[in-house]
Image (cartoon, rainbow, N blue to C red):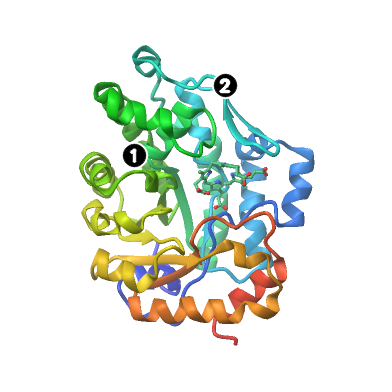
Amino acid sequence: MSFKDSVVMQVFRGEDPARIPVWFMRQAGRYLPEYQEIRARHSMLDVIRTPELAAEVTLQPLRRFELDAGIIFADILNPLIGMGIELDFVEGTGPVISNPVSSRGEIERLLVPAPEENVPYTLKAIRQVSSELTPRNIPLFGFAGAPFTLSSYLIEGSSSKNLEKTKALFRGDIESWRNLQEKLLRLVEDYLVAQVEAGASAVQIFDSWVGHLAPVEFSERVVPDLAKLVHSVKARTSVPILYFGTMTAGLLPHFRSIGADGYGIDWRSTLSDARKLIGDGPVLQGNLDPSLLSLPAAGIDTHVHAVLKDGRVAGRHIFNVGHGLLPTTSIDTLSRVIEVVRGGA
Ligand code: CP3
């Protein structure tokens, strides 16, 4: 696979791209009427588990917008089902795990199924989408949750404000924490490799809630696992690996030790500051505040130009949001953003 005309791959290769690449985290989702239409008839888990639907939803934003990458439709949490957890996506609440883990024994009992058994539907969806996108030179991102963020859902059972139970295990029962991380590391490594084998041309590791940790906890107790994960995936594949988190301003000096090819930065840091803290080399992806996209298109240009300018200072920039698109995103505003980034304005 060469993807020689893909601007995303040019940036990863360290070349000057013909223009700044643009795609969006959670670019398939509720802000699109065509997504809503499918979700009116199928639950979130049904869409994920039906390759034809997952492929269709992945392609929806690529039909509507001139995007430089796709991201396979799934969630970071559905691969946990095969470990023995019960997951549902509840309207208005988000993901809910009805049997979260808290004790040593519960962690001990978690299974680590092979991806071909656990998530065959996602691998099939990747095969379908990549066969459509590869001839068009559009790379497809595969992804997985990072062990820390996955642990937070396994332990809390849903999205949590302060991650108190997670931090209690992280600090209070180091042996159980290690046991959990070892299982998740195996699950995630094999899952990412399987996605690449199915046709993903890059992978992103989502560590959305890692910013809850202090820098020293991150560098001493999380970075070594991430570095091991990145190293192991790199030993088995040859695609770019991106690491993303939010509220990471204080963690950025430690990012380099993870060894990823690129890092997703949220809007609480500037890309140029992130460059100074991370150092030269890795790609930086981001970092428009997604809440700006619910404003009318007329006011958006200034914000996009500011990110582009900061990205020029930082270098090796892929334009994206600093966190996933919100359901309130305006389609007109998003179209305008893409037009501006692509140089049409
Ligand atoms: O980026 C993409 O378009 C690919 C699909 C994708 C989804 N979730 C679809 C989704 C990806 C990459 C994710 C990652 C994910 N999921 C993360 C990491 C990124 C981030 O946003 O921090 C996290 C923490 C989750 C867990 C999760 N899934 C939450 C907290 C929620 C509820 C949030 C909400 O806005 O309701 C989900 C549900 C979810 N995942 C939706 C989508 C499109 C909404 C589902 C629906 O109701 O139709």
Assign a secondary structure to mark 2. Answer: loop
Q: Kindly identify which residue carries mark 1.
A: 189
Image x and y of residue 167, in percent: 36, 32
Q: Kindly identify which residue carries mark 2.
A: 98
- Name the quadrant containing residue 338: bottom right
Q: Is residue 212 left or right of residue 221?
A: right
**Residue at 60%, 87% in the rendered image:** 345
Assign a secondary structure to mark 1. Answer: helix
Q: Residues within 10 Å of mark 1 (few under 14, many from 20)?
A: many
Rendered position, 88 above or below 281: above
Does the numbered disc 2 mark a residue whose Cβ is under 8 Å from ligand 1? no
Q: Is residue 247 left or right of residue 336?
A: left
**Amino acid marked by disc 2:** Ser
**Amino acid marked by disc 1:** Glu
Q: Is residue 259 left or right of residue 34?
A: left
**Residue at 53%, 37% in the rendered image:** 159
Please identify the quadrant where the N terminus is shown: bottom left
Quarter of the render that holds ligand 1: top right
Q: Residues within 10 Å of mark 2 (few under 14, many from 20)?
A: some
Give the number of the mark in front: 1 or 2. 2
**C-alpha distance separating marks 1 and 2:** 26 Å
- Name the quadrant containing residue 176: top left
